[in-house]
Image: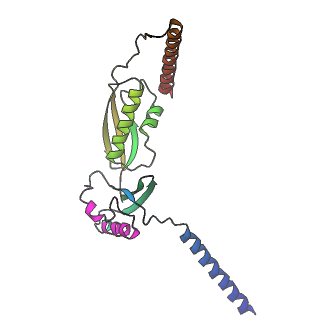
Amino acid sequence: MRCWIISVLVVLAGSSHVQCQQVSESNKVSYDGQTVAAVGLIANPKISIESLRPMVQQKTGEPYSSAKVESSVSALRETGRFTKVAVEVKPDSGGLHVTFILEPVLYFGVFDFPGATKGFSYTRLLQVVDIPNQTPYTQDVVTKAEENLRSFFVSAGYFQAQVQPEPRFDGTHMLANVVFHVNLGKRAKLGNVEVRGPEPAEANRLLHATRSLRATAMARRIVMASV
């Protein structure tokens, strides 16, 4: 009698294990067959990425292949230069973005904006560069942040603003701190506005509208500077 009870418990436990395994496998996302829009490699800035690209079998413009990605990971590991090779896949409207992260990599640390913090808050400038925490360092991300800053300054009236990024690598803490040197230059100002052509009443209405727009723009600049 006791043996019969034990055998039932063993069968139930085995059934439960199989069920959990099936659930975990069903949760895996398969990208096979989807178009790959971009393939990138992220490594320590001291390592030449171009020398590693021939090892990556998954190519841009081709369908995603789990077999090719796994073979690429194996080839990169066999170099013995990396402690870990991770793959990040991000779906996008134009296709998949596949990134091979070759550890140890540097992550973005502290940002500084000399020349810009007098007119804009540090928090607002961080929002503009838009680099989330735990982002691996790449030059492409720095270039995009530089473009974001320049566009932001132009929208605030600094049409001649210059931005020069300076990465500073901290190998001890595996961080890439970036100083964005900013020269805002002079802010453009709206001069006198004249309305010619319509009747005087309509001209006065249009002038009043332009004054309201100028006041709104000024208020918006004040808000952006104080955020």
Judge whether residue 103 can be spotted in this image: no
**For residue 221, side relative to residue 51 (left or right):** right
**Residue 146 found in image quarter:** top left
Q: Position of residue 52 (x, y in %)?
A: 27, 60
Residue 222 higher or lower than 16, as above or below: above
Residue under the point 38% across and 59% down: 36
Residue 178 higher or lower than 72, as above or below: above
**For residue 121, side relative to residue 4 (left or right):** left
**Residue 51 found in image quarter:** bottom left
Residue under the point 52% across and 66% down: 28
Q: Is residue 55 magenta?
A: yes
Between 51 and 175, the residue placed more toward the observer is: 51
**Residue 141 found in image quarter:** top left
Q: Residue furthest top?
A: 200
Q: Position of residue 207 (x, y in %)?
A: 49, 11
Image quadrant holding the N terminus, namely bottom right
Start and end of the magenta stretch? 49-75
Between 163 and 204, the residue placed more toward the observer is: 204
Between 173 and 106, the residue placed more toward the observer is: 106
**For residue 37, side relative to residue 49 (left or right):** right
Residue under the point 41% across and 15% down: 190
Q: Is residue 85 magenta?
A: no
Residue 73 higher or lower than 121, as above or below: below
Residue 39 higher or lower than 28, as above or below: above
Q: Position of residue 205 (x, y in %)?
A: 53, 11
Which colour assignment does the render follow?
rainbow
